[in-house]
Image (cartoon, rainbow, N blue to C red):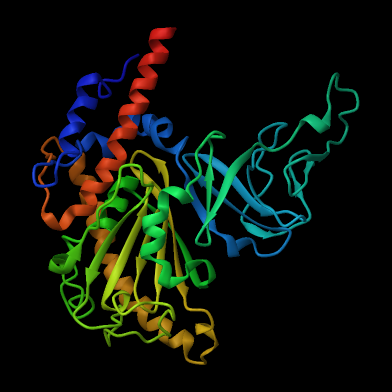
Amino acid sequence: MASPVLTDAFIESLESSVVELDRAETLPPACYTDAEIYAFEKEALFNHEWLCVGREDWVKEPGDYFTTQIIGEPIVVARARDGVVRAMSSVCQHRAMLVAEGKGNTRGFVCPYHHWVYGLDGKLVNAPAMDRTCDFDKKKVRLPEFKVETWLGFLFINFDPDAAPLAPRLTRVAEAVAGYDLANAESATIMTGQFAWNWKVMFENNNDGYHASKLHQGPLHDFVPSELAIFPEWSPQDAGFLRFNGTLHPDASFNPTQRAVLPVFPNLTELDRSRMTFANVPPTLSLVLTNDVAIYLILRATGPETMEQDTGILVAPGASEDPAFAHRLEMIMTSAGKIIAQDMHVDSLVQVGLRSRFAPRGRYSWQEGAQGQFNQWLVPRYRAAWNRMKSKAAAE
């Protein structure tokens, strides 16, 4: 049965979201609420784009592993004995039991159900009592493996074995954040949450400079005014885009002093230290970079109106050696927590509003330049997937 939402007319209507920002309108509300569109996004986006799943330092040593999920796919990431980091389906190839949960260090993965054993490279090592099964060859069985790429210490996977490399399409972003040396930054804390709104609601809020001086008005945010937002040019071929936001004084940071209380990242330029940098690699990674803390947000869609997110903090190498580190970090986390709580409240109510018959296709302020860039990333992928689906249907 054809989708009542996904039609040629619907796809054509998206073109008004990718024109110049001063003429553009927001995406249709159905993009944030409709189950058919979420199912469509799996093919249009998640099956072919590079998806951030974590940090390389989560698997520092051979045998280290962690698990995650995105669009319902259970994933295990492990560093094998040869030092190679691999990402695989954690679904046992016998009866679909998950072979791994949580994180830890292991010699291999043992399915709890029937004790099939897989190596850290995903190959089946042992399958008890399968000797009477006709034409069963354990050498032909393994956990399905995904492409893996590391970018600035972040681990990305791709379900598409033919996907082009990620890093060459993130050159502009990498150059903009080079001073933070994120690949060598020190992990300070990680939190995971589940949220009742569409992943794009969260991603757009992370990108949005327009709301900052309104929603977050007060001493914890006033030193990063919305009118100092800058949106660098980008190419549709780029895999990510940027927002810079000037600060009223150098070395600004989210804490009651408004200034860096942890060591400043040592390679930052004078220009870096006079602004905050927001980097976005859709559909899964957003970065908020201050002078003493780098916040990363790893978004994981779980449904048309639900998502999970890993929120992590990176600091300059050696920062944690200060005896007062925990107290200084607490200052930042407390202040950032108050700002994030405001964002979460808005996200939840935006999702409610998007379900309304009165939900609009609104217009953009110049301070929403990153939203226009996100649309220019999103809509061509929708269009290409729709054309692929139509061609396939015609061939059948």
Location of the N terminus by quadrant is: top left
With respect to residue 180, does 145 lie above or below? above
Q: Position of residue 156 (x, y in %)?
A: 52, 50
Q: Residue at x 74, y 45 (%)?
A: 112
Q: Is residue 357 left or right of residue 131?
A: left
With respect to residue 169, does 336 lie above or below? below
Q: Position of residue 285 (x, y in %)?
A: 41, 54
With respect to residue 377, does 172 lie above or below? below
Is residue 190 visible from the viewing direction of this image?
yes
Residue 210, quarter of picture: bottom left
Q: Residue at x 35, y 55 (%)?
A: 280
Q: Is residue 104 left or right of residue 363?
A: right
In depth, the one of 383 and 255 nearer the eye is: 383
Location of the C terminus by quadrant is: top left
Q: Residue furthest right?
A: 131
Q: Is residue 153 left or right of residue 170?
A: right
Q: Is residue 204 left or right of residue 90?
A: left
Q: Residue at x 22, y 76 (%)?
A: 247
Is residue 33 visible from the viewing direction of this image?
no
Circle count: 0
With respect to residue 78, does 118 lie above or below? above
In depth, the one of 182 and 297 nearer the eye is: 182
Q: Position of residue 324 (x, y in %)?
A: 47, 91
In depth, the one of 363 and 346 nearer the eye is: 363
Q: Position of residue 94 (x, y in %)?
A: 73, 31
